[in-house]
Amino acid sequence: MRIVKIMMVTLVLMGLLWGCATNPQQKPVEPVPGAPNREPTISLYVKEQGIKKNIKLEEYLAGVVAAEMEPSWPENALAAQAILARTFTMENIKAQRVKKLHGTDASTDIEEFQAYNPSRINDKVRQAVASTRGQVITYRGDYVKGWFSACDGGISATAQEGLSYTKGPTPYIKAGARDGCLAETVPENQHWRVELPLQQVQAAVRKISGTDPGNINAVEIVERGPSGRTTKIRIGSATVSGPDLRLALGSDKVRSMLITGAQVQGNNLVLEGKGFGHGVGLCQWGANKLASEGKTPQEIIKFYYRDVDIQKLWD
């Protein structure tokens, strides 16, 4: 009997040890130094009115989500956008980027910060923000860059490829994520074509490179990144960054750098491509598709961001 008891205790101990080996405890989430543990009131520069006002952060985020994403979309897609927008806001406040411009924490100028339109807020948006209250995305104890684009053309990009971003490492960006967004998005994102006057193209090249491309009678894609995006393009005699050229020519016209055709026709540069935006981080049309498939906001975030934590700063 004694031997039986000893064997039973041994088996229990072995089971416990095996459980510890196969189910290791999760590492504790690293807190962000200086992060608030209560909802902050932020200062907002309202460009449209030329005024500054104070607003609760969660109230501000509802106006951002409503402006940045279609308010009628699935709530989980809106909630993923809320987490991202909250992260973007906190990361930028910490860096004091807008503080240097207007003396405020945030701005409604989309070239400086995020879009903001409280008139589009509906019950879905309010619930999406409320259900993710206080949640931000972090990587090793710091906020991630809250990048997103409208439609990544079916495949996401690295920060360097999509944005020419080289200021620091962004290992949390999951490049090469295939979300099938082209099957869901609007036709103008599935295929677009634009004709740009060569005079405008010459001015853009001079602006970003400081050199004159000369007589533009040819265009050539010199380099593509891992996702197929144009990273370098030769315009006349000058070679420039693809993302820089897109911004200089107008990101609403050159919808992405997933270029499928480039040629000079008469007095125009003709570009064709797919997608809309830089393709780095979350894809909004992809988030819409994933939410429709039943994915949670956190699962949507982690589809586009790797090895990140989603932590709750305040209740």
Image (tube, rainbow, N blue to C red):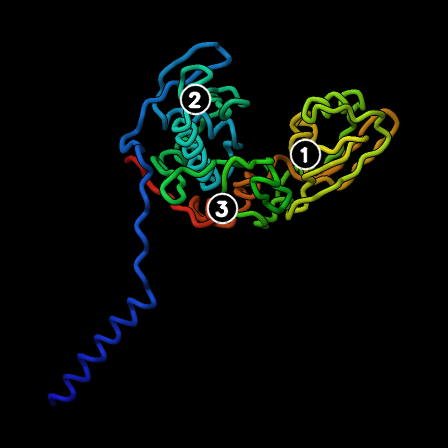
Identify residue type, mark 2.
Ala
Q: Which residue is mark 1?
A: 241
Q: Which residue is mark 2?
A: 106
Callout 2–callout 3 Cβ contact below 8 Å: no
Count numbered badges in the picture. 3
Identify residue type, mark 1.
Ser
Pinpoint residue 63: horizontal percent, then vertical percent. 45, 25
Decide: few, some or many residues near mark 2? Use Cα within 10 Å; few <14, some 14-19, many ≥20.
many
Pinpoint residue 231: horizontal percent, then vertical percent. 67, 39
Sequence order check: which comes first, mark 2 or mark 1? Answer: 2
Q: Nearer the viewer, residue 290 or 13?
A: 13
Decide: few, some or many residues near mark 3? Use Cα within 10 Å; few <14, some 14-19, many ≥20.
some
Q: Nearer the viewer, residue 2 or 216?
A: 216
Residue 190 in view here: no
Farthest right residue?
266
Sequence order check: which comes first, mark 3 or mark 1? Answer: 3
266 versus 162 height, above or below = above
Identify residue type, mark 3.
Pro
Q: Which residue is mark 3?
A: 171
Callout 2–callout 1 Cβ contact below 8 Å: no
Residue 297 in view here: yes
Quarter of the image where the N terminus is located: bottom left
Horizontally, residue 216 falls left or right of residue 52, namely: right
